[in-house]
Structures are given as structure tokens and as C-alpha cells.
Amino acid sequence: MSTESRRLVENDKRVRYYRLNTEDVVFARKVLEYRQRQREKKERKGQEEQAGYKRELCSEDANSVRSQCD
């Protein structure tokens, strides 16, 4: 990320103020939001697959597997 700066004179001292480039900040926020959506999507998909697997196990007649369904 790049910075922007400006030089001011305050109390007979030269002071330089730095700040992040606004366009870079906007882009970085969009990237972070996209990555968060992808993580949530992946998590939901994993939970759905896990629920489907559990339904398969519970539909079997094996008594040893049946205890996992409660």
C-alpha cells in the first residue's frame, strides 16, 4: 500500500504528515470483504457436506453407527 504525504510548518518546525493512499485503502477493503465472503461460503459448504454425511450414516441400519445420530 502506498502513502501520501504533505509537509507543513508548525511552530517553526517542519512536520511531514503521512496517510495511506485512499484508492489503495478502498481496494484493500474490497479484497478483505471478498475473502471473508469466500471463507463463509466455504464454511457453509463444509457444514452442508457434513450434515449430508451424517444423514447418510443415520439412514443405515447398523446399530454401531446409530449412536452417532443422537
Image: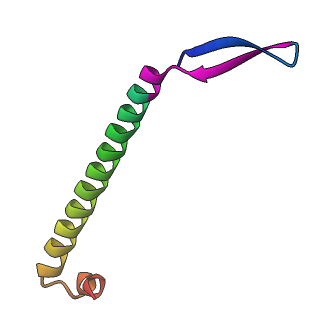
Instruction: Using the image, determine if residue 60 lies above or below residue 7.
Output: below
Overall secondary structure of the magenta section: strand
Q: Nearer the viewer, residue 50 or 44?
A: 44
Residue 49 appears at what percent x and percent y? 21, 60
Residue 2 appears at what percent x and percent y? 54, 15
* Residue 53 occupies quadrant: bottom left
Residue found at x 27% / y 84%: 64
Residue found at x 47% / y 23%: 22
Based on the picture, tell me whether residue 18 belongs to the magenta stretch. yes
* Residue 48 occupies quadrant: bottom left
Which residues fall within the magenta stretch? 13-25
| Quadrant where the C terminus is found in the figure | bottom left
Residue 6 appears at what percent x and percent y? 65, 12
Judged from this view, the residue extending furthest toward the right is: 12
Left/right of residue 31 with respect to residue 62 in the rendered view? right
Q: Nearer the viewer, residue 43 or 17?
A: 17
Left/right of residue 65 with respect to residue 52 in the rendered view? right
Residue found at x 23% / y 86%: 66
Total marks shown come to 0
* Residue 55 occupies quadrant: bottom left
Residue 46 appears at what percent x and percent y? 27, 57
Left/right of residue 61 with respect to residue 16 in the rendered view? left
Instruction: Using the image, determine if residue 7 lies above or below residue 43.
Output: above
Q: How is the image coloured?
A: rainbow
Q: Nearer the viewer, residue 63 or 5?
A: 5
Based on the picture, tell me whether residue 7 belongs to the magenta stretch. no
Q: Nearer the viewer, residue 13 or 55?
A: 13
Judged from this view, the residue extending furthest toward the front is: 11
